[in-house]
Image (spheres, helix red, strand yellow):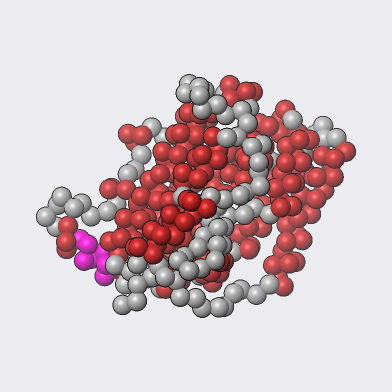
Amino acid sequence: MKFIGQKIDSVFYEFLKPIEELWQPSDFLPDSANENFLSDVKLLQEAARELPYDYIAVLVGDTITEEALPTYESWLMTVEGVNQQDPQQGWTKWIRAWTAEENRHGDLLNKYLYLSGRVNMRAMEVSTQYLIADGFDIETGTDPYRNFVYTSFQELATNISHRRTATLAKQYGNTLLSKMCGVIAADEMRHAKAYKAFVERIFEVDSSEMMLAFEDMMRKKIVMPAHFLRETGVKIGETFSHYSDAAQRIGVYTTYDYIEIMDSLLKEWKIDKVSGLNEAGEKARDYLMALPTRLKRVAERTKAPNLDYNFSWISAY
Ligand SMILES: [Fe+2]
Ligand SMILES: [Fe+2]
């Protein structure tokens, strides 16, 4: 961590943006200080009426996932080599600045959903509070190698899902929502590049251990950050599977995307060409290289979930 941390400043400027230049949620939302506010909200609500049930459910789940940001920041602060007591340390600065960027995602989506008239906000807020209170277990421990595999994967997964909700919004004729999801997706891609760059550097200096960490994370399977998602009266994690079913049904995030991400990481980190591996490292590489094909075979045998579910988050109207 010290070694990569030395060059973190350049990563900083490459993958994060100055606050003053970044978009803010209010750039996209009706301005409540403006006299046209009510008519703008009316237009927003009319457009939101066209959004299908599963789509709203996915958007709510995405929002809650983003809103559980305190969990992610506090988790990353405990990673070995990150020292919060040293505010000038590169890693501390990185995590804080990353958090600051991410914080806009939940803000923007939450405000949109509030204005949309489609969501039972209280039910959604209860789920958010539960998720933050329940935390998560992504099985990385405090190991930076495992954590950076996880964050690389996760940023790519959120990039895909926000990108898809953007595309779908456009198809439903909702340009505003499409733009919103699009700018969030772009942030996620920048973040993914940063975390992938950290892993790439570790591969340069500690290839066997990095390979083993990658293998370990993939054997355990990457769990989504909202895997404990629940609603009032629903068992922990159960709402998550309904949310992820809805995402599969509308094609926002599917098993094939998981495999696609895995495949892209193998290429990005040139896993087939990593040199200097010890025996265990070589074995880990073999496992990883064979994994996409294996997962595809499994995916072909699993059917897309068809079960309908009534989320407490969505207002009946
Ligand atoms: Fe995000
Ligand atoms: Fe992210």
The x and y percentages for residue 175 are 33, 61
**Residue 99 among those drawn in magenta:** no
Q: Is residue 42 magenta?
A: yes
Instruction: Quadrant for residue 125, please give it.
Output: bottom left
Q: Is residue 24 above or below residue 172?
A: above
Q: Could you say which quadrant of the image residue 120 lies in?
A: bottom left
Which residue corresponds to the image point at 64% horizontal and 52% vertical from the top-left?
Answer: 222
Residue 157 visible to an observer of this rendering? no
On the image, the x and y values in percent for residue 8 come to: 54, 26
Using residue 199 as the reference point, say whether residue 64 is left or right of it. left
Q: Position of residue 243 (x, y in %)?
A: 51, 66
**In the image, what residue occupies the spot 63% across and 31% down?**
80
Whether residue 306 can be seen here: yes
* Magenta stretch bounds: 40-46
Which secondary structure class fits the magenta region best?
helix
Horizontal side, residue 196 vs residue 110: left or right: right
Count the numbered circles shown. 0
Q: Nearer the viewer, residue 81 or 184?
A: 81
> 183 or 61, which is in the foreground?
61
Location of residue 97 with respect to 178 vertically, above or below: above
Q: Quadrant of the C terminus?
A: bottom left
Q: Position of residue 52 (x, y in %)?
A: 41, 73
Image quarter where the N terminus lies is top right
Q: Residue at x 28, y 61 (%)?
A: 115
Which residue is at the far right?
279
Seen at 88% across and 38% down, the residue is 279
| Residue 130 left/right relative to 263 | left
Residue 11 shown left or right of residue 142 in the figure = left
